[in-house]
Amino acid sequence: MKRQRTITKRTVFLKMLPSGDAIILITGLALVYFPVVHFPSLAFHVGDYPFIPVMGMAMAMFGFLCCLQRTYLAIRGILSLSRQEKVLGFSFNDEMSKQNVTSTRYVSSHWFIDVRHNRNYLHTFIVLKRSFIKSIGKIEERKSAAGAAARTSIIVTTVDGKKQKVWISFTKNKDIIFDLRKWYRTRKSDTKNEVNGK
């Protein structure tokens, strides 16, 4: 049986970046869209508006924004992790190797790691070492126009006196924030290695 490799900073960073399929899809949409824009005679018009160019632009922009969000989370998360290494004087790669952590979803007495993305628009990049946290605030929910919780967040105060907001979009994913707060408050000594998120 092939031995699984332990996770590294590179692993968690690449986990959040847009996949090759997503990049190919957006590139394909652009290649289809721009010729239609340059040759409006090929477009099917609805009233005075070119239907195909508008739809093509909307689809391309949606795909681009999704990729942009994941790239932003990846960069933001890796910078936070690098700051933890600098402040506490440790190597993330070495610690994961010593503890034989092979999953990007891992909870122990010292670590809360949840780095994943899936087709349900769940994108998370949370990598926190317990000794880096000085205190953790209350959970806040930002409401959408319809009145439902659109984003759930919590403020983490770190040992160097800075505040870091950890947030999750969409109501159905907010349990991750509650799990984070519970993990910090319970300070369990046992270790649980969970499966990789899809």
Image (spheres, helix red, strand yellow):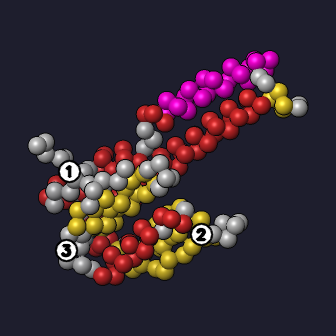
Q: Which quadrant of the view contains residue 82?
A: bottom left
Residue 4 falls within the magenta-colored stretch: no
CA distance separating discs 2 and 3? 33 Å
Who comes first in sequence, dot 2 or dot 3?
2
Magenta-tinted stretch: 23-42
* Number of the label disc, if any, that sits on residue 149: 2
Q: Which quadrant of the view contains residue 176?
A: bottom left
Is residue 134 visible to the viewer in this orientation of the structure? Answer: no
Is residue 61 visible to the viewer in this orientation of the structure? Answer: yes
Give the residue drawn at x 68%, y 19%: 35
**As drawn, is 100 to the left or to the right of 126?**
left
Q: Amino acid at mark 3?
A: Asp
Q: Secondary structure at mark 2?
A: strand
**As drawn, is 85 to the left or to the right of 173?**
left
Q: Answer above or below: position of 149 versus 42.
A: below
Q: Amino acid at mark 2?
A: Ala
Residue 36 falls within the magenta-colored stretch: yes
Give the residue drawn at x 63%, y 23%: 32
Q: Residue 12, position in %: x, y?
A: 33, 50
CA distance separating discs 1 and 3? 19 Å
Task: Tell me if mark 3 has few (under 14), some (14-19) or many (20+) residues whose alpha carbon lies within 10 angstroms of its own.
Answer: few
Give the residue drawn at x 55%, y 33%: 26
